[in-house]
Amino acid sequence: MEKLTPEEISRYHRHILLPEIGGAGQQKLKAARVMVIGAGGLGAPVLQYLAAAGVGTLGIVDDDRVSLSNLQRQVIHDSGTIGDEKTESAARALLRLNPNVRVERFEQHFGPDFAGSYLGRFNLLIDGSDNFETRYAAADAAEARKIPLVTGAVGRFDGSVTVLKPYETSADGSLNPGYRDLFPEPPPAGLVPSCAEAGIVGALTGVIGTLMAMEAIKLITGTGEPLVGRLLLYDGLSARFDTIRYRRRKATSGT
């Protein structure tokens, strides 16, 4: 594993002081290759905190451009980047924050074809998308390639986070649940309004995105207990966190 430079040891000193991470954990972060879907409300804090943490390579997948209405929550961008590709704007911000990070830009929509071409180059996937089509595609692709997936969602004043590793077994020997065990099928079109239709508190995306980044750091360093089989729920209006457990659904017999 690649050694840390003196500058990196100084930059990540607060991590290295932690027995749960230490120098070995920081080296794991440096060696990690993480793909992030979306450079928007959730992707912004994910990318910023993973870059600050020293993740060696960040892949950014987004086919959109920065607009004025994004800036209320997508804090990786600013007024001077309006009209720029989000991947380009985000990459510039990340390199200002930490020039040691390598950024790979993908101005494309994440789907099965894209995953087949590029996902194999990464060892962790983070889904900060805002639609069910991409969420299911991300879950299927990560499961097929046996890489962990951190996925989050937000709406108005609330959000959720979970970690998916359905290719591994839990302590009781049963397979971990997948995305369809939590959400068997997407809701009917139009049932769940987008943030453009319903509105959203900008700071909420920071809360959920930061939690997603924390789960990613735990997965990379092998620290703590990731949210596998657990859905973390946050209600911003009541300042309340809840966790619900979910399991793999039993296969139904056709006889």
Image (cartoon, rainbow, N blue to C red):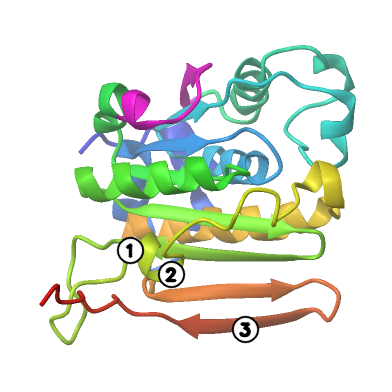
Residue 227 can be seen, yes or no: no
Could you tell me residue 122's position as x and y percent? 30, 34
Q: Quadrant of the N terminus?
A: top left
Q: Which residues are magenta?
A: 100-115
Q: Is residue 72 left or right of residue 12?
A: right
| Farthest-out residue, top | 84
Among numbered discs 3 and 1, the one appearing first in the sequence: 1
Nearest to the observer: residue 194 or residue 4: 194
Location of mark 3 (residue) = 242
Residue 123 can be seen, yes or no: yes
Q: CA distance from mark 1 to mark 2?
A: 7 Å
Location of mark 1 (residue) = 178
Which residue is at a point 66% across and 39% down the rendered structure image? 44
Asked if the residues shown at circle 1 and circle 2 are in contact, with their CB atoms under 8 angstroms apart, the answer is yes
Among numbered discs 3 and 2, the one appearing first in the sequence: 2
Q: Quadrant of residue 29?
A: top left
Nearest to the observer: residue 153 or residue 6: 153
Which residue is at a point 21% across and 43% down the rendered structure image? 145
Could you tell me residue 62's position as x and y percent? 57, 25
Q: Secondary structure at mark 3?
A: strand
Could you tell me residue 21's position as x and y percent? 38, 61
